[in-house]
Image: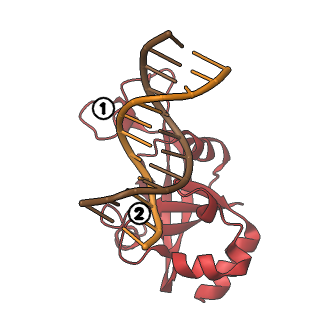
Chain colours: A red, B brown, C orange
DNA sequence: GCCAACGTTGGC
DNA sequence: GCCAACGTTGGC
């Protein structure tokens, strides 16, 4: 069992959208960064827990959690020329990009904002603060517990 | 909307 | 395999 943080732009897909389809899962597609891809493909397992992070919006921060219901499988969007996530260099026999399915778990009463995370000494180790552009990233159990302490 | 950070591409 | 140019992310 591992912990992760997934970023999303709420204008595109928010935790409310994820909650709205519950108990159905959402296909977490469109990851086109190799480091994020490697985490998706190699390290994420069923029942891993996920922090949902809203970026590029008014209230930036961690807004809730989800659970992985389906580990990595090939993201078919890469082969679809009409799709925004089409990748001309992807090959059917050697896919480049993967996705996972996640299911809504909870929305926090209060968003744990990026500002709060920056101010919390126990969360200074978060990759979020070091590697701004990684949209799938591991979270340690310690960090997870500190975050849960804040929001419950 | 600006721009810093940084990942990716491609010429050499 | 280096590195400059380019493109994208994401906070402000």
Residue at position x 76%, y 73% in the image: A142
Relative to A113, C12 lies left or right:
left
Relative to A19, A94 lies left or right:
right
Q: From this view, report whether residue A96 is shown above or below residue A114.
A: above
Quadrant in which residue A60 is drawn:
bottom left
* Residues behind callouts 1 and 2 on a single chain: yes
Residue at position x 30%, y 32% in the image: A80
Quadrant in which residue C3 is drawn:
top right
Relative to A17, A122 lies left or right:
right
Would residue A49 be seen by someone viewing this image from the given angle?
no
Mark linked to residue A72: none
Q: Residue furthest right?
A: A142
Chain under disc 2: A
x and y percent of residue A112 in the render? Answer: 53, 81
Give SS at disc 2: loop
In terms of depth relative to the viewer, which is nearer, B4 or C10? Answer: B4
Tag 2 or tag 1, which sits nearer the N-term?
A: 2
Give SS at disc 1: loop
x and y percent of residue A8 in the render? Answer: 42, 61
**Mark 2 lies on residue:** A24
x and y percent of residue A63 in the render? Answer: 48, 76
x and y percent of residue A17 in the render? Answer: 34, 69
From mark 1 to mark 2, how far is it between C-alphas? 24 Å
Q: How many marks?
A: 2
Chain under disc 1: A
- Classed neighbour count for the residue bearing mark 2: other residues with Cα under 10 Å, few (<14), some (14–19), many (≥20): some
Residue at position x 49%, y 20% in the image: A93
Mark linked to residue A80: 1
Q: The N terminus of chain A is located in which quarter?
A: bottom right
């Amino acid at each position: 069992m591992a912990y992760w943080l997934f970023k999303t732009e709420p204008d595109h897909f928010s935790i409310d959208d994820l909650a709205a389809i519950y108990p159905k899962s959402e296909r977490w597609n469109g990851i086109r960064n190799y480091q994020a891809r490697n985490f998706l493909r190699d390290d994420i397992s069923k029942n891993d827990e996920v922090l949902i992070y809203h970026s590029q919006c008014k209230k930036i921060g961690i807004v809730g959690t989800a659970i992985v219901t389906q580990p990595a499988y090939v993201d078919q969007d890469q082969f679809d020329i009409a799709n925004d996530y089409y990748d001309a260099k992807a090959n059917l026999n050697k896919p480049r990009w993967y996705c996972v399915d996640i299911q809504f778990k909870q929305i926090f009463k209060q968003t744990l904002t990026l500002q709060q995370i920056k101010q919390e000494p126990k969360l200074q180790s978060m990759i979020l603060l070091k590697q701004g552009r990684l949209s799938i990233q591991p979270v340690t159990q310690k960090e997870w517990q500190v975050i849960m302490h804040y929001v419950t």
